[in-house]
Image (cartoon, rainbow, N blue to C red):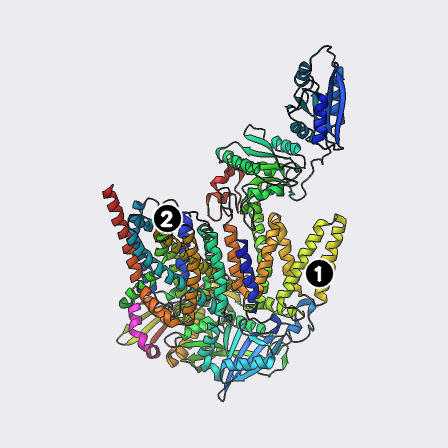
């Protein structure tokens, strides 16, 4: 037994030639931007600057903690190779937390994601976003705060989702949506301005709405209000805060928070026309208000809140389902779960049917909590 | 080599782990499809498997604690030799296929840049050590690995609770009836643990027939749970994923580890090694019962392991060699034939013996 | 055989002992008959010898008594205050004398009489050095066998405790005591142990470790023989149906069989509330796995799978590693070897020098290697945590060190795959251990739900007391 144990250990030791890259030789990509122009891909990578961190051993803790580099090539892989050559480091995208696609590169979304998803080290929880104009502009925005820019981008997306301005989407969720019948997905849309100048508070980049990609190309741009409809039709799990919205009521602003949002979908198919009843139920809580006795006004607030939910949902539906025939909220799954026979009848012509479908939106909002101020 | 017997629990756990391994490490072309039909196919395949086991379980009572092949061999060397050859060939193919599965899994995940030869040297050394340690040690290791698998499964379920979208399930159990049979046969043909049980049941102490329903139940439940997770978390993306369970673990975000696909690798590499070792022990049992005895049978297990991995390496280099064998074994016919021939032979031999007595 | 002539017997004894200087022979005349007392210098208590042997002999006054009658009187009437046994041969006489007896030889008789007047210098019963506890006795085994036997007997005042003494080692003639509780299983086990001890070929047995290999399988790493310095732990093992072996000259008593899970169970667990026992046992298990896996995992992830490390941590690790000249694996191996050197140096040195070594090694070198940029701080931290964790399961700290080193090499050279294969090999190796009819890894593998009541969790005494523990039922 000892001999066999020794043989195994020797085998392990002899195989020291299993190729690997030392940690310090890696460029650990934190954010990746992809652009396409004149048949050439430009991949902009924000990678970690090792000199700036490491506790007391940092070489220069005042240096920017992210370095931005660009690589060009006829494919995304060759652009990454060029980048690797340029930086002298092996680019690892396994830890990338955000991937941003420029408008012109959105047609390559599926291929790029397949590249990332198929690689065992790909971070399938990386957040995917689009950029109005070029992704490299977003990558080049720098923040004066100590953290890497990518953390700021993540924070912006998280905050925007909590405020109901967008819906974050991860790499595997995008891939899943691109497998659907309409191959449609809505990505949060960044807009950068101010180039690579340092900004105090990140005002050099904003979330400008959403980018609708259908059938492998950038189809349409959604406003922030339309994007917020996703929070109603494709809500986050019940357990977490969904979104906030500001309502005009009794001459002042009342801000409410929605949670336990759930769309109840009832499809009907009659005479070649699809009719979909969507009833959105949710609980809400007052975040801030200038109404003195809000609990006495709960019915009114519930009513106006329901109107707002319907309005936002209709905005999204008309822009995506009706105008573009794009199922961005997983409506197909709901139809199939409700009636598999109906689904088999409409699946082949789903895109056309979505365009011509009739959508009836209703909302039932219950005010459960009033906040702490009377 | 140690030749002690293993308990029912240890046997059931090993068989279940071996069966679940085939689910977690599919070969190219064995993609898991999104859809409710898979639930039906899995359930039906396990019911079929249980039916296939029934004759063996019934005749096991007649062998009085020894292995069924041993019982046949004591009556007719020719018949046992014939069955032994069939079993040996089938076991050899299954072991080579297990090596191939392990290789594809490892090279598709964490062992991507290393040459295939390193993989086979590593696995070969560990396999020889497992054969040297004996079935009992392998069984105990199986218990530990299965505990690790259970922990992994729990972690995945808890971390992905928020990602589970039950609206992706729909109330249809047979969506494409014409494909249901093919799916069921494919799932059934993956259950080559029948051979392991048939060959090794002489090494199981206690009421050994109990091991089969336990193993079938546990592995069926685990595969159904895995299918549920694929469908509800990945939806239609499932069919594009080479290793859906690995991908599940890579999106499971724990505070400490960020993603837990490292544990997934540990579980399935170990499970692959255990499965290879099981085939080696099964082969040794067949050789001992039908052909050789004593030290020669023990040595045959080592030779079997090395040969199976060598052929597996050839399959890796020349997939064209593997395809025809896969078509034959994937049809489920060899498995079904084995499930009929062995019990029939045991029945004939024991009836004759009783009559003679 | 002893002869009738005292002078011949004395000559034979001197010749047998090759005129050894520590052989003490005192002559006397009792009732006109020549008597001599044979003992070894330093093995007897002078007071006992004077009061319990010489005084009764000198006070005896029975003129005309025959030598046979005198010998009978000495053994049956005069010297009954002490242990005594007749000796019939020179070898027996010498052996008894070497064990602290004085042998009284009477001219004209063929048997001598050995009187137990042991009085050699021995360490007093003190707190055990290695197996300390918070609540519980402060008594540990010492080197003297009979003291240790009395420590055990004091804890089990029952006829169920059976002690069987025997001699092991042709040259050393070391006395060992095989202890067991009188039950069906441990009886058979005790017989087996005695049989193995009788066949121990070692001629010089100086420590329990000399006979331990003859009680275990030829397993390369783990031992199925436990060692304890604590009589209370020893007794609890006997109560569970194990067999204990106390060896003269060693403060460590052995017991068989030992299970892997016992390394994580301490006496203190039984005096704390079950909830805290569960917590601390889980901590021990975690410490064990951290100790063997952490550095190996670190090197595997840093070299091959950085994407598995959480982002913020990865940045810090990369920053720290970028400042060091060596690869992650080299750093890890150097630090681990350095730690082992420090440990070894600290163990053998006197405690005051040992502290200095710890300070120089731990603080000065530890701090300087990081600030000089030779080793990354996270690596130092990983090795330090792993090393400290290794002490929690001190009984298998050598095995832990070996496994840690092997896994560092496997992880650093072949990544997670190599780490998994080597872990599998270790797992098989542990699982293949187990002599005395009980698997070493039970009750985990094979799994026994019933035994879980005192493995990870420790049920309350009300529940534990309902059934007697039995090692063969795990």
Does dot 1 land on a helix, a strand or a loop? helix
User: What quarter of the picture does the N terminus of chain C occupy?
Assistant: top right
Query: Residue at left 59%, top 78%?
Result: A203
Residue C97 left/right relative to A220 = right
Q: Percent from the top left, x then y, of residue A117?
A: 47, 72
Q: Position of residue C120 (x, y in %)?
A: 72, 32
Residue located 58% across and 34% down the image: C178
Checking the image for residue C366, the label placed there is: 1
Residue B231 coordinates in the image, percent (x, y)? 39, 65
- On the image, which quarter does residue C157 sit in? top right
What residue is disc 2 on?
Answer: B202
Q: Chain of mark 1?
A: C
Host chain of mark 2: B
- Relative to C253, C119 lies left or right: right
Front position in the image: C392 or A329: C392
The secondary structure that most of the magenta stretch takes on is: helix
Question: Is A341 within the magenta?
Answer: yes
Q: Is residue B54 visible?
A: no
In reply to whether residue B139 is colored magenta, the answer given is no
Q: Which residues are magenta?
A: A340-354
- Counting from the top left corner in percent of width and height, residue A302 is at 44, 66
The answer to whether residue A193 shows anywhere in this view is yes
Q: Quadrant of residue A362?
A: bottom left
Q: Is residue B218 above or below residue C375?
A: above
Determine whether the residue tagged by mark 2 lies in a helix, strand or loop: helix
Q: Is residue B280 above or below residue A246?
A: above
The residue carrying pointer 2 sits among few (fewer than 14), some (14 to 19) or many (20 or more) residues within 10 Å by Cα, namely many
């Amino acid at each position: 037994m000892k001999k066999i144990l020794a043989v195994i250990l020797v085998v392990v030791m002899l195989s020291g030639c299993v190729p690997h890259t030392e940690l310090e030789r890696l460029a650990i990509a934190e954010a990746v931007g992809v652009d396409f122009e004149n048949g050439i891909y430009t991949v902009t990578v924000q990678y970690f600057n090792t000199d700036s961190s490491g506790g007391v051993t940092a070489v220069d803790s005042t240096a920017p903690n992210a370095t931005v580099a660009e690589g060009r090539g006829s494919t995304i892989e060759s652009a990454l190779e060029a980048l690797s050559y340029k930086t002298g480091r092996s680019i690892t995208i396994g830890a990338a937390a955000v991937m941003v696609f420029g408008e012109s590169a959105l047609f390559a979304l599926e291929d790029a994601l397949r590249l990332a998803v198929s690689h065992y080290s790909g971070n399938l929880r990386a957040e995917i976003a689009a950029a109005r104009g070029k992704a490299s502009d977003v990558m080049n925005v720098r923040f004066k705060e100590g953290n890497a820019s990518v953390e700021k981008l993540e924070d912006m997306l998280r905050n925007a989702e909590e405020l109901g301005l967008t819906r974050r989407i991860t790499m595997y969720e995008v891939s899943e949506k691109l497998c659907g019948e309409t191959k449609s997905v809505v990505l949060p849309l960044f807009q950068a301005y101010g180039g690579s100048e340092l900004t105090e508070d990140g005002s050099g980049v904003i979330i400008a709405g959403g980018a609708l990609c259908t059938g492998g190309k950038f189809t349409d741009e959604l406003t922030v209000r339309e994007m917020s409809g996703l929070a109603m039709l494709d809500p986050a799990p019940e357990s977490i805060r969904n979104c906030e919205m500001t309502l005009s009521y009794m001459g002042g602003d009342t801000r409410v928070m929605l949670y336990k949002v759930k769309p109840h979908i009832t499809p009907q198919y009659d005479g070649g026309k699809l009719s979909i009843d969507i009833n959105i139920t949710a609980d809400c809580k007052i975040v801030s208000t200038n109404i003195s006795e809000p609990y006495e006004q709960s019915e009114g607030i519930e009513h106006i809140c329901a109107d707002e939910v319907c309005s936002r949902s209709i905005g999204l539906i008309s822009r995506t389902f009706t105008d573009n025939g794009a199922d961005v909220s997983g409506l197909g799954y709901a139809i199939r779960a409700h009636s598999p026979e109906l689904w088999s009848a409409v699946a082949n012509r789903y895109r056309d049917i979505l365009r011509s479908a009739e959508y009836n939106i209703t909302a039932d909002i219950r005010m459960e909590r009033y906040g702490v101020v009377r | 080599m140690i030749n002690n017997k293993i308990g029912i629990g240890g046997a059931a756990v090993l068989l279940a782990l071996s069966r679940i391994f085939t689910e977690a490490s599919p070969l190219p072309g064995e993609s898991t499809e999104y859809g409710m039909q898979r639930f039906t196919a899995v359930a039906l395949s396990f019911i079929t498997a249980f039916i296939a086991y029934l004759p063996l379980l019934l005749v096991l009572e007649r062998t009085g604690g020894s292995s069924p092949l041993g019982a046949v061999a004591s009556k007719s060397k020719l018949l046992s030799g014939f069955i032994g050859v069939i079993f040996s060939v089938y076991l050899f193919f299954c072991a080579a296929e297990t090596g191939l599965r392990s290789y594809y899994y490892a090279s598709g995940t964490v062992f991507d840049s290393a040459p295939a030869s390193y993989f086979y040297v590593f696995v070969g050394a560990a396999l020889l050590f497992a054969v040297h340690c004996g079935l009992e040690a392998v069984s105990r290791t199986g218990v530990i690995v299965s505990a690790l698998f259970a922990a992994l499964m729990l972690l995945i379920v808890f971390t992905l609770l928020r990602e589970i979208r039950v609206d992706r399930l729909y109330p249809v159990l047979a969506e494409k009836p014409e494909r249901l049979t093919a799916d069921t046969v494919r799932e059934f043909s993956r259950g080559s643990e029948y051979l392991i049980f048939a060959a090794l049941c002489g090494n199981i102490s206690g009421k050994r027939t109990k091991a089969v329903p336990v193993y079938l139940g546990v592995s069926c439940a685990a595969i159904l749970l895995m299918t549920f997770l694929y469908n509800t978390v990945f939806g239609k993306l499932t069919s594009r994923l080479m290793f859906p369970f690995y991908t599940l673990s890579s999106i499971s975000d724990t505070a400490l580890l960020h993603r837990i696909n490292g544990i997934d690798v540990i579980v399935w590499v170990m499970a692959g090694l255990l499965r290879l070792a099981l085939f080696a022990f099964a082969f040794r049992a067949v050789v001992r019962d039908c052909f050789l005895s004593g030290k020669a049978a023990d040595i045959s297990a080592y030779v079997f392991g090395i040969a199976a991995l060598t052929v597996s390496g050839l399959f890796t280099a020349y997939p064209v060699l593997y395809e025809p064998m896969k078509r034959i074994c994937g049809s489920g016919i060899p498995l079904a034939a084995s499930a009929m021939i062995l019990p029939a032979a045991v029945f004939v031999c024991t009836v004759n013996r009783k009559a003679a007595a | 055989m002893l002869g009738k002539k005292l002078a011949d017997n004395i000559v034979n004894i001197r010749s047998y002992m090759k005129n050894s200087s520590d052989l003490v022979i005192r002559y006397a005349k009792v009732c006109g008959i020549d008597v001599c007392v044979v003992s070894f210098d330093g093995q007897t208590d002078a007071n006992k010898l004077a009061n319990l042997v010489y005084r009764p002999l000198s006070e005896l006054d029975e003129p005309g008594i025959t030598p046979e009658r005198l010998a009978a009187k000495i053994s049956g009437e005069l010297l009954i205050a002490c242990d005594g046994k007749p000796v019939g041969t020179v070898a027996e006489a010498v052996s008894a004398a070497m064990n602290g007896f004085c042998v009284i030889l009477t001219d004209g008789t063929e048997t001598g009489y050995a009187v137990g007047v042991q009085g050699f210098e021995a360490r007093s019963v003190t707190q055990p050095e290695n197996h300390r506890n918070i609540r519980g006795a402060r008594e540990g085994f010492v080197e003297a066998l009979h003291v240790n036997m009395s420590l055990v007997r004091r804890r089990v005042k029952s006829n169920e405790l059976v002690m069987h003494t025997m001699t092991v080692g042709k040259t050393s003639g070391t006395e060992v005591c095989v202890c067991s509780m009188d039950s069906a299983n441990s009886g058979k086990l005790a017989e087996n142990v005695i049989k193995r001890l009788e066949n121990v070929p070692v001629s010089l047995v100086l420590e329990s470790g000399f006979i331990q290999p003859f009680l275990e399988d030829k397993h390369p790493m783990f031992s199925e023989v436990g060692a304890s310095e604590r009589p209370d732990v020893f007794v609890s093992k006997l109560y569970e149906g194990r067999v204990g072996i106390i060896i003269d000259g060693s403060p460590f008593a052995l017991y068989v069989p030992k299970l892997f899970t016992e390394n994580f169970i301490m006496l203190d667990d039984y005096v704390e509330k079950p909830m805290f026992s569960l917590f601390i046992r889980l901590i021990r298990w975690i410490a064990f796995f951290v100790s063997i896996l952490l550095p190996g995992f670190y090197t595997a992830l840093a070299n091959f799978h950085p994407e598995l490390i959480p982002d913020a941590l990865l940045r810090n690790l990369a920053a720290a590693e970028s400042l060091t000249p060596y690869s992650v694996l080299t750093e890890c191996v150097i630090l681990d070897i350095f730690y082992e050197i420090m440990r070894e140096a600290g163990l053998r040195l006197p405690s005051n020098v040992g502290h200095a070594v710890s300070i120089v090694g731990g603080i000065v070198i530890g701090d300087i290697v990081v600030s000089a940029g030779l080793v990354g701080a996270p690596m130092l931290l990983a090795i330090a945590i792993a090393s400290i964790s290794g002490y929690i399961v001190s009984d298998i700290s050598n095995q832990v060190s070996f496994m840690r080193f092997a896994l560092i090499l496997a992880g650093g050279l072949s990544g997670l795959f190599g780490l998994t294969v080597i872990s599998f090999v270790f797992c098989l190796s542990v699982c293949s251990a187990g002599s005395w009819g009980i698997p070493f890894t039970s009750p985990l593998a094979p799994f026994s739900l019933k035994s879980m009541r005192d493995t990870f969790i420790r049920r309350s005494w009300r529940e534990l007391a309902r059934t007697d523990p039995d090692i063969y039922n795990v």
